[in-house]
Every structure is written in C-alpha cells, then in structure tokens.
Image (cartoon, rainbow, N blue to C red):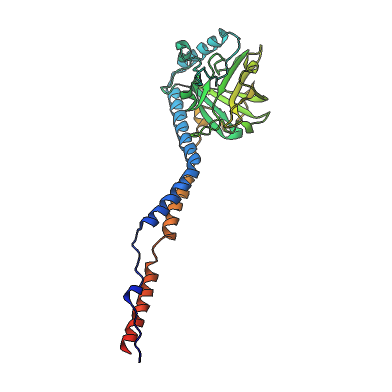
Amino acid sequence: MTQLQYSPRRLARPPQLWSLQRLAIVLIATIGVGVLLYPTAAAWFSDRVHDTQISGYATTVKDLAQTEQQRLLAQAHQYNAELPAGPLRDPYSLNENGETETVGSGSAAYKKMLAVDPEGMMGTISIPAISTNLPVFHGTDEATLAKGVGHLFGSSLPVGGTSTHAVLTAHSGYVNSTLFDSLKRVVTGDVFSVTVLDQTIYYKVDQIKTVLPDETEDLRQVKGKDYITLVTCTPTGVNTHRLLVRGERIADPVKANGPQTVANNVTNPGFPWWVVILVGTAAGTIILTRPQGRRVRKQNQRLEEIEWHNDDL
C-alpha cells in the first residue's frame, strides 16, 4: 500500500507571545483612543488644579483675621470709588506683532488689591447653570487666562457697590481647559455668584450680547447700577466677536444649606472615566490580538497523529 508522506514543514508554528505586528496594533489603538480622549483628560486635570487653587484660597481666607478681611474689602471699595468711568480696552487686544497685549501689568497698586493668596487669586466665580466654578486672578495677560478667569484692569474690582461694573473674562475653546466654553448656554435670568474673601455676592443675568472686539460701550460703569459682565471670545475657535453676559446685583438668595462660602465653590471633577476607557482599549486590543497558541498546538497534534498513523501502514 502506498504510504502517505507529510512534510514537517506543513506543521504550523506557534506564534511568539509578542510580535512586532501585535505590539504595533496595540500601540496604534491605544494612542488613537488617547488622542480622542485628550480634551476630556486635559479638562479633568484642569478641574483638579482649579479645585486645588480654590481650596487653597479658602484655607487662606479662613486663617485671615476678620479685621484684615474688612480692611481689604474697604480698600477695594475705595479703589472702585476712585476709578475713572472711562472706556475699557478689549481684554484680547493684539499689538502690531499679533501678540496679546498685557493690560494693567504695570500697576503695582492694582495687583495689591485683594491680594491674600500666593497664587495671585482675588476670588472665585460660580455659575451653577453650567456647573462652572473657577478661580479669578488679577489681569488678563495670556499667562493668567491660561489658568483661570482674569479680571479686566480698569474695571471695578468684583466686590459690588453702587455704580460699579466689574469685567471678568476667560477663554473658550482652550485646548487644556473648559473655562468659559459653556458660557454660551447661560440664559437671561440665570444667577451666578462671585466670592471675594468671606463675602459672596449674587448677580442675575439681565443682558446677553455678541459684539465686535472694539465695541466696549457695554462694559462701562452705569450710574446707580451694580454690574458684573462675563466676557469670552465667540464663535469658539474663530474668535471674531465677544460674548458679553451681564449680571445685575440681587439680594443674597436664601440657601437651604446655609450661607455661601469659598469652600462651597469647590467641586469634585469626579472619577476619571477616560482612564477606564483608555485602559480598556489597551486590554481589549491585547486580548483580540493574543496568539492562538492553543489552537495551533492542537492543529499540529492532529497533523502529527495523521503522519504517525500513515507511517504505521
């Protein structure tokens, strides 16, 4: 009887545990998902930083003597009383070189106002309608706007008072933080608050406008009024106009959980679900590309059994 011959070269070879192809697939999949998750991850880390800053400010204020807080607030009100009611410059003005101009960077007296925090914070802002809690810093230079909300030099300090108008501005569409991204969702009637030292003052949105950068008339002081206007660039990524969200001072709303303090403005950014997605992607790719060693070994065993059987014929 003719003997069947099976060449050993027909036997499948079990793949190595890790091959360059498999490693490349896992890396590409993980990096691809990582790129998609970067904005979410960056915003999460930014929120963590903001919460740390607000918590640090709250601790500093808590340790500050009440008499010192009253002195600083009185000093700020005096500063506002002496502030000229002239026109203001757009906080995102560019110089002839296309660079953001630093507004008020040379005012040493201004920088000393409400300065109790080593981070340079003057207070915090809370906008419940869009779940936004951010630190407020002196000035609107690029370094300041990269880390939070800037107070426009030349506008009133955000401590309230008759015939005052504070201007607070922050980026929209900033790659590393959400900041004022959701300001466009605020509607007339929404309430926001600003906390400076141990004082929290509330404002109800009464006007929303989109204007050109050089149209700053709506940022002027209005006799007898107490305003705060929130400013950001719009449309996001295009930045040809400015979104102005103005609030008028209202009485402190009754809170079921007691008086508002700086500590109340601290919000936990929550669990970083983006980490789970990233790790899950890597793990899933590893599982899907795992070597089929067991199946290959069984295939080899069957081929060997056939060869041995035919050798015995």
Q: Residue at x 61, y 12 (%)?
A: 87
Indicate the position of residue 237 as horizontal and vertical percent values: 57, 32
Quadrant in the picture for residue 183 = top right
Vertical relation: 300 (above or below) 127:
below
Q: Nearer the viewer, residue 6 or 141?
A: 6
Quadrant in the picture for residue 93 = top right
Q: Residue at x 36, y 55 (%)?
A: 20
Direction from residue 217 to residue 99 in the image, left or right? left
Indicate the position of residue 255 as horizontal and vertical percent values: 60, 30
Indicate the position of residue 16 as horizontal and vertical percent values: 33, 62
Quarter in which the N terminus is drawn: bottom left
Q: Nearer the viewer, residue 14 or 227?
A: 14
Indicate the position of residue 126 as horizontal and vertical percent values: 56, 29
Q: Nearer the viewer, residue 174 or 71?
A: 174
Q: Residue at x 52, y 32 (%)?
A: 174
Give the total number of marks visible in the rendering.
Answer: 0
Vertical relation: 68 (above or below) 312:
above
Q: Is residue 262 visible?
A: yes
Residue found farthest to the front: 2
Q: Is residue 271 visible?
A: no
Quarter in which the C terminus is drawn: bottom left
Q: Residue at x 35, y 58 (%)?
A: 19
Q: Nearer the viewer, residue 55 or 294?
A: 294
Residue found farthest to the bottom: 1
